[in-house]
Image (cartoon, rainbow, N blue to C red):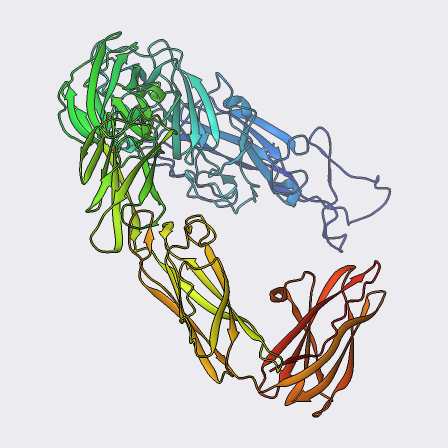
Amino acid sequence: GPLEAYTHTLANQGSDDGLDSDGQPSGGGLVIVTPVITGDDYSYDFGLVDLVSLGNQVWYDTDDSGTLDAGEVGVAGVVVELYQDVDGDGVFTPGVDRLVSTATTTAGGYYTFTRLYPSLLPTQTYLVVITQTNFAPGGVLEGYVNSTAVYTGDSDLNGHDHGYVYGTLGAGGYVASGAVTVTPGDEPTDDGDADANSNLTIDFGFYRLSLGNRVWYDVNNNGYLDAGESGAAGIEVRLYDGTGTTLLMTTTTDASGYYTFTGLVSGTYVVEVVAPGDYVSSQDIGTTGNPDNNVDGDDNGVGTAGGTIRSNPVHLVAGDAGAQGNNVVDDNTGSTHNPTVDFGLYLAGDLMVVKSDDPDPVVVGTVLTYTFTVTNNGPSVARNVVVTDTLPPEVVFLSATPAQSNGPNPLVWTGLGDLDVGASLRFTVTVRVLVTATDVFTNVVVVGSDTPDYNADNNVDEEPTTPLVPALRLVKTVEPGRVTRNQPLTYTIRITNNGDVTFDPLVLTDTLPPDFHYIAGSGSPADPDVVAEPTLVWQNLGPLAPGRSLTVTFAVTATPSITGTYVNVATATGTTPGPVLTDTDSAPVEVVNPAVVIEKRVAAVDLDIVEPNFVTFTILVTNVGPSAINVLPLQDLYDDYYLSFVNAAPYPEEDADDGDLAWYDLTGPAPNGFDRDLLPGETFVVTTVFRVVRDITTTINTAVISGVYDIYDNPADRADDDAAISDVPTAIGLRYFQVGDVSGRSVRLEWATAVEVDTFGFNLYRASEPDRARASLLGFVPSQGHGSGAVYEYTDTVPYDGVWWYWLADVDTSGGETFHGPVSATVGGTVLPYRIYLPIVVR
C-alpha cells in the first residue's frame, strides 16, 4: 500500500495535543486509536516516518590497517546479528539488548538490515555483532582477529573497521560495533548508494597472523636445516609475550616437526622449545640471534644448552612479507604467516675429565706428576676436542705428554681431533713444586669440544695437593758462659724438626773459636765424625722425623792468649727429598782471669781509759771469678808502733810482731787455712786482734793478697784493702742497758749513763734474731746528760710474740754511733731480764 515504506512516529510528544501524534502500533503493524471516539474531536492525529536500513561489509584486513585497501576482499558466510540497545548504554550487553535481526554476509562480505525503526530515542539505537560462532572451530573466522584500528558506530566512515573485541575470540569472544543511530534523511549518501535513509558504513576488518615453523634434528650441528635432516615430532613449543614472562599458547610439533601459532595480533613474541632428553640447541650461527632477519631453515635457539631453548624476540606485523620475503601474505584470506622461526636440536655428548696427582702430599722442591684422562661418554662424537690445564703458581712446568700446543700456563692442547663415543685420551704433566709453597694448591683442567655437552659438571676437575714443608731449628747454649783458661765448658745444641719432612741425613757442623780444643770422649750422643779443629762435624745425626728433636752436647777447653769474648757457631744441615735446609746459632763465651777481691773492716775497737785496749779487724776475701782458687796467700800489714798482734783465725804462718803477718795459703789445712778451695762466689773471713800499745790518732792496717792461682793454674791479679782507726771524740759512761718490763707486746727498755761528753742522743735498734745487721731502727732519744749522767727509758711495741733483740747506740755530735748490747726480751713467755753492769767507757 502507499504506507509500506513508513512507520508511526512517537505518540504524545509535546504539549499541544492538537499537534502531536496519537497513534499506537498494533501487533499487526496497523495503527489503532484509543480511547474510542464518541464525539467530535479534532485532536487525534497520526504521524508517519520513513523506515531505515544499515549494513555493510566484513572484509579481510590483511595488513591490519583498519581500512579497506586495494586488493583486500570481503568474507562470505559471516553471521551478523543486529540488536536494539535496550539499556541505551552504547555497548552490546548480552541478555539485555534485544535481537532485532540476523544476516549472513554474501560473497563480497556484505550484509544489510532493512525496514528498521528510526533511532528516535537512545534506546532505539542499534548494535551490530559478529557472533562468537564465527570464531569457533570450523567457523568462517576461526583463527582471525579484529583489526587494531577501530571507529565509532556513528563515524559514517565507509571502509573502516567499527569492531570492538569482547572476550577471547575462539573461546566465546565476539566483536560488536558501538551504538549506531539511524535517522531518516540524515544518513550518508557516499556509502555506495544515494539513499539518505540507509547507513552502509558499519564495516568489520579481520586478519589472520600466524607464526611457525619447524623443529629439526641438526645431525651435523651446523645450525642449518640440511637435506636429509628430519623434523622432530611431538616436541612441546611455547609462545610467550615479548618479555618472555607471560605464556600465551602451547602446541606440539607434528610428524614432520612443524608447529604453528595462529590467532596472533601484531606484536612481539618469544618462542620456546622443550628439548627432549640429552638434546641441546644447535650451535649458534650468525643468524641465530636475530629471528627478524626472516632467514628460513636456520637455528633460532639462542645458546647451546639443553632443557628449554628460546628464541630472541620476534616481531610480527600483519601484511609484512619479511626481510627476506619469506613470510606468506595472502589478501584472499587476509592472512600473514611467518614460517622462519626454526629450532635445530643436536644430541649432545658427555665429555668427562678425571685428574690425579702423585705424590700427594709432596715435598716442596720435588717433582709432582699430574695425570688426567678425557673420556667421551657419548652418545655423540665429540668434535674438535680441546683440553686446557691451568697450573697453580706454586709449581714450575717441566714437561707434558703429549706435548702441549700452547703454554706453559695455561697448557692448551688443540688439534686433538674428534673423540669417538667410549674413547679416551690420557695426559701427563710433570712439574716441580716451589720451595716457597706453604699451603694447599690446586690444579684445574677443563675439557671442551664443538659438540654440545649436556653434563658440563664433569668437564672440569680440580686436583688439590698438600705440600710438605721442611723446617729446621737449632738452638745453642754454653755452660758456663764465663771461664778461665783451661777451664772445661760444655756446649749444648738442640736441633728440632718443626716441619713436615724427615731429615736424613742430618749433618751438624760446629766451628770452634781459635784456641778452643775439643775434649775427646765428651760428645753425646757421640763424638764428632770429623775433628779438624776448629771444625767439628757429625756427618749424620738423622733420620730426624717431623716433630722430633735431638740434643748434642760436647765439652771443650779454652786456651786463648788474651781474655775476651769468643763466639762458637753451629750449623745444622738437613737433607730432604726436596730442599736442603740449614739453621745456625751461636753461643758467646767470656774468657777471663781468675779474680779475688779483699775487703778489710774494723770489727771492734776498745779505746777506753782502762787498759789494755784492743782493736779487732776482719779481712773478707771473695772469689769473683769463674774458677775455684786453690792457692791463696794473704799478707796483713799493720803499724807496730800503735798495735801489737794478739791473735788471728785462722792463724798466720808468720806471726812475728813486726808489722807483717803472713798466711802462705788460706786454702791450706787448719789452723793456718780453711782446708778447702775458695769456690766462685764464696768468701773467706779472716779475723785479727791487736792490742793498742800507744794512743792512736790515726793508723792504717792493710791486707794484701798476691800470688793467687786457680785450680787450672791461672794466676789472679793482686788485690789489697786497708782500714783506718782514728780517735773517737765521744765518751759516755754506761751504767746499764736492760729490759725493764714486758707487758703484753710492750717492752720497756732502760739505760743509765754515768757521764756524757759531746753526746747528741741515742738510737735504739730491734731484730728478731741476735744479728745486728738485721736490726731495724726503732727511734731516737735525745741526750739529757749534758756532761753528767742521766737515766732513760723507751717503750717498744713488737708485732708478734717471740724473742726480740735490742741494741743501744750512743750518737756523738758528729753523727758517729757506738753500739751497746744486745739484750733480749721474750714476749708471750717468761721474761728474763738481761743487765750489763759496768761502767764501760768507750771513746
What is the total number of numbered labels drawn onto the structure image?
0
Q: Quadrant of the N terminus?
A: top right
The residue lying toward the viewer, choosing from 655 and 702, is 655
The C terminus sits in image quarter: bottom right
Closest to the observer: 255 or 751?
751
Name the residue located 37 percent from the left edge and 36 percent from the top edge: 68
Q: Residue 576, percent across and down?
A: 25, 27
Q: Residue at x 53, y 46 (%)?
A: 185
Residue reaching furthest to the top: 422
**Front residue of 662 and 394:** 662
Q: Is residue 819 left or right of residue 247?
A: right
Q: Quadrant of residue 307?
A: top left
Give the image location of residue 265, x and y in percent: 42, 32
Front-lying residue, 653 or 721: 653
Does residue 162 appear left or right of residue 458 in this picture? right
Q: Is residue 132 above or below residue 569?
A: above
Image coordinates for residue 768, horizontal then vertical, percent: 70, 61
Identified at 48% across, 39% down, the residue is 162
Q: Is residue 298 above or below residue 217?
A: below
Q: Is residue 548 visible?
A: yes
**Residue ranking furthest to the front:** 656
Q: Quadrant of residue 568?
A: top left
Q: Give coordinates of residue 252: x percent, y percent.
A: 42, 15
Residue 348 in view, yes or no: no
